[in-house]
Amino acid sequence: MRHFKNIPLLIEDLFQKSDTSRLTYHTYAHTLEVSSKVLVAARALNLETAELLFVAGLFHDTGYLFGYQKHEAKSMELAEHYLIKNQIPFEEINFINECIAATELGVLPLHEAAALLKDCDLSYGITDKFFERGPQLRKEWELNLDKFYSDEDWEKLQLDFLEHVLFSSNYAKIHFMPIVEKNLLLQRKRIFTV
């Protein structure tokens, strides 16, 4: 990757030097999986921006290392600082930040590439490892947001979330939605056993 070969090491170092004890879901492993997943998807779609999407994926949740609220803005600030320092063209920095901005809950992606990152980020917690990652998110909310749920309320919240998943990209609708639908059936069964 042309200008970006040191970024994975930079991100790893950032996570290693930070207090991540309150991040049980938004971890370095999350960052790696999301960035790898978006790179695979972008290459499958022959997007010329695959490399930039990978970089956006690496930076997209680094803001959590500095605070839970408004982490996307901090992630964009960190990306911009590093990329300007390394003389990356403004158009590429802007594109990367548009993709990061799209990962915020409720934000509509400005373009297909941003939609792809948003969907890969969302897919981390709701596809093949949904039942493993749900408890990680629950714990993180307890530690950072003082949100506590009974087991029954958590299972209902998970069900509601799965019932309302909306992917923005066609890629995710094809590749991730079938897994979400399978998890939805399994979650409905769990509701009756809690």
Image: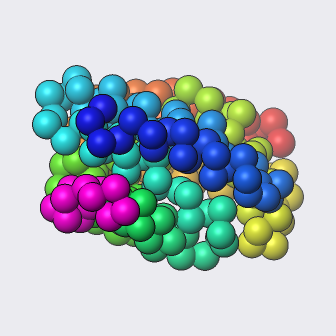
For the point 43% across and 31% down, which residue is it?
Answer: 36
**Along the viewing direction, whichever of 22 and 74 lies nearer the viewer:** 74
Q: Main secondary structure of the magenta part?
A: helix
Region rendered in magenta: 84-96
Residue 5 in the image: state x and y as whole percent: 39, 35
**Along the viewing direction, whichever of 138 and 103 lies nearer the viewer:** 103
Find out whether residue 74 is within the magenta segment: no
Q: According to the image, what is the colour scheme of the structure? A: rainbow
Q: Is residue 116 rendered to the left or right of residue 148? A: left
- Depicted 114 relative to depicted 146: above or below: above
Q: Is residue 86 visible?
A: yes
**Along the viewing direction, whichever of 38 and 123 lies nearer the viewer:** 38
Find out whether residue 85 is within the magenta segment: yes
Q: How many marks?
A: 0
Residue 33 in the image: state x and y as whole percent: 52, 34
Q: Is residue 153 visible?
A: no
Quarter of the image for residue 140 reads bottom right
- Depicted 55 relative to depicted 143: above or below: above
For the point 63% across and 37% down, which residue is it?
Answer: 29
For the point 61% across and 42% down, which residue is it?
Answer: 12
Quarter placement of the C terminus: top right
Quarter placement of the N terminus: top left
Q: Is residue 105 rendered to the left or right of residue 147? A: left
For the point 73% across and 53% down, which residue is it?
Answer: 17
Residue 132 in the image: state x and y as whole percent: 71, 33
- Depicted 122 relative to depicted 186: above or below: below
Q: Is residue 72 rendered to the left or right of residue 146? A: left
**Along the viewing direction, whichever of 125 and 173 lies nearer the viewer:** 125
Residue 162 in the image: state x and y as whole percent: 52, 46
